[in-house]
Image: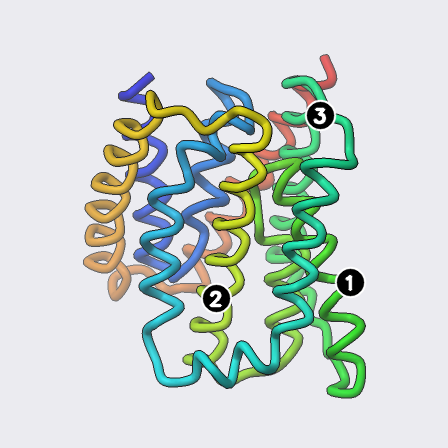
């Protein structure tokens, strides 16, 4: 199991090193092949929190981003609470199906380059709704990319601000997910060692990814990434149904 965890985080870190994102999504998807999404999400907490706090603090726009994104961040907390307390906990098979569906949707949006635009006057109420949905999806699947990432991309920020905004959103999602998993009894001290291994291997994978970033065009790698994610998501969804 430790070998599987190390392999998943090595590949996830490699992907993040090349394209700057995808570590939680890849790690949760791959670990979903050998354990429940809840267990995979619990192991994800430490590596995700460390990398996302660093990403959130890099840059000088944190306070401005908090002022702009507070409805989404508040909604994430509310959605996580709804998913953890009000929605009945599903079995491992059903959770795996939802994880697979989330990965397929995320991959499809990336492959078809679906872009949205959010008018400034709608950011408060729409951000709140997007946050609630993101929190609920995070509890159900362990993936906090949907629908938060497409929404942040639709705000049309410049690249550095977008990267920092993603780090801020992921940090809040990770923290609230940790609370939800603790409420469900999934956070155990026995997972600390696998989490630390995942963190160390992910950092190594990120280094490898950064080394090859200049040798492979980002567009080609993104295509391979989303195709692989699509296949993985379809496999998880079908396996959970059969």
- Marks 1 and 3, how far apart at CA: 22 Å
| 82 on left or right of 42 | right
Closer to the N terminus: mark 1 or mark 2? 1
- The quarter of the picture where the C terminus appears is top right
Mark 1 and mark 2 residues within 8 Å of each other at the beta carbon: no
- The quarter of the picture where the N terminus appears is top left
Q: Residue at x 66, y 42 (%)?
A: 102
Closer to the N terminus: mark 2 or mark 3? 3
Residue 61, image x, y percentages: 43, 84
Residue 97, image x, y percentages: 69, 27
| 185 on left or right of 220 | right
Return the residue at label 2: 168
- Looking at the picture, tell me which residue is in the foreground, 159 or 161: 161
Return the residue at label 3: 89
For label 2, the SS is helix
**Badge 2: residue crowd in 10 Å (few <14, some 14–19, many ≥20):** many
Looking at the image, is 48 positioned above or below residue 37? below
Quarter holding residue 58: bottom left
Q: Residue at x 49, y 50 (%)?
A: 175
């Amino acid at each position: 199991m430790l070998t599987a965890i190390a392999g998943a985080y090595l590949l996830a870190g490699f992907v993040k090193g090349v394209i700057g994102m995808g570590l939680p999504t890849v790690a949760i998807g791959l670990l979903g092949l050998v354990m429940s999404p809840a267990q995979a999400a619990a192991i994800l907490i430490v590596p995700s929190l460390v990398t996302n706090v660093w990403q959130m603090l890099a840059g000088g726009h944190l306070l401005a981003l908090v002022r702009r994104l507070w409805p989404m961040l508040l909604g994430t907390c509310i959605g996580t609470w709804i998913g953890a307390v009000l929605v009945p906990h599903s079995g491992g098979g059903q959770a795996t199906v939802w994880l697979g569906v989330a990965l397929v949707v995320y991959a499809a949006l990336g492959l078809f380059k679906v872009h949205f635009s959010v008018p400034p006057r709608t950011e408060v109420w729409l951000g709140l709704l997007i946050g609630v949905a993101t929190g609920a999806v995070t509890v159900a699947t362990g993936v906090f990319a949907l629908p938060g990432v497409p929404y942040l991309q639709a705000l049309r920020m410049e690249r550095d601000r977008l990267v920092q905004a993603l780090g801020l959103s992921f940090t809040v999602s990770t923290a609230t997910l940790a609370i939800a998993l603790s409420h469900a009894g999934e956070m155990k001290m026995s997972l600390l060692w696998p989490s630390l291994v995942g963190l160390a291997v992910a950092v190594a994978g990120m280094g490898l990814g950064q080394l090859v970033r200049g040798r492979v065009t980002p567009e080609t790698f993104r295509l391979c990434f989303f195709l692989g994610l699509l296949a993985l998501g379809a496999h998880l969804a079908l396996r959970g149904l059969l």
